[in-house]
Each structure stands twice: as C-alpha cells, then as structure tokens.
Image (cartoon, rainbow, N blue to C red):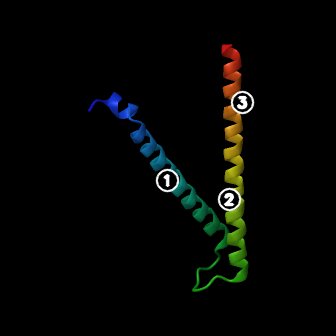
Amino acid sequence: MDSQGATADPQLQQFIEIESQKQRFQQLVHQMTEVCWEKCMDKPGPKLDSRTEACFVNCVERFIDTSQFILNRLEQTQRSRGSFSETMSD
C-alpha cells in the first residue's frame, strides 16, 4: 500500500483523529490530576477531609472552565481567520 492510499482513506483518517482526541483527553486528565494534587493535597491519608475534597472539586471545575474557555477562544480565532482568508481571496 502506498502512502497516498493511506492518507486518502477516510476511515483511516477518522480512526487517527479519534485516537488523537483520546490522547489529548488523557493528557488533559493527567495534567489536571497533577495540578490539583499539588494544589490541594497536603498529607495523603486514608480519607479526604472536607477541605481537601472541596479544594479538589473547585480545582477540577476551574480547570475544566479554563480549558473550555481556551478551546472556545481558539475556535473563534480560527473562524475569524477563515472568514478573513475567504474575504481576501474574493
């Protein structure tokens, strides 16, 4: 199979995109876990106290909010560049 056949296969492209999304998600979860653990965990023990649990919940929620904000901003930037490019080519 030649390299052009592999890149032209829509099923293969879709599979690669899905796997890439899974990898990005796993990286995001790992990063969030690391950040929130460092921020909230004083002394590991058999149970979380209410303050530590609240810190984790807040940290995860802020991390998700921030990630969503960044993604939305990037999408807006790409859309505005796309419409700018279309305007320039007309």
Farthest residue in the bottom direction? 46
Question: Which part of the image, by quadrant, shows the N terminus?
Answer: top left
* Label 3 crowd bin: few (<14), some (14–19), many (20+), radius 10 Å: few
Image quarter for residue 48? bottom right
- Inspect the image, locate mark 3, and give the three-letter code of the amino acid beneath it: Ser
Which residue: 69% across, 51% down?
Answer: 68
Q: Are marks 1 and 2 in contact (CB under 8 Å)?
A: no
Which residue: 59% across, 80% down?
Answer: 44
- Counting residues from the start of the chain, the first of labels 3 and 1 encountered is 1
**SS class, disc 3:** helix
Q: Point out residue 38 in the picture as x, y percentages from the top left corner.
A: 62, 67
Disc 1 versus disc 2: distance between alpha carbons? Answer: 18 Å
Q: 86 and 70: which one is in front?
A: 86
* Left or right: where 86 falls relative to 28: right
Q: Point out residue 16 in the picture as x, y percentages from the top left corner.
A: 43, 44
Image mark for residue 22: 1
Image quarter for residue 40? bottom right
Which residue: 73% across, 79% down?
Answer: 51
- Inspect the image, locate mark 2, and give the three-letter code of the amino acid beneath it: Phe
Disc 3 versus disc 1: distance between alpha carbons? Answer: 27 Å
* Left or right: where 5 falls relative to 84: left
**Which residue is labeled 2 in the image?**
63
Which residue: 71% across, 37% down?
Answer: 76
**Which residue is labeled 3 in the image?**
80
- Counting residues from the start of the chain, the first of labels 3 and 2 encountered is 2
Q: Do the residues labelled 3 and 1 touch (CB within 8 Å)?
A: no
**SS class, disc 2:** helix
Q: Point out residue 79 in the picture as x, y percentages from the top left corner.
A: 69, 32
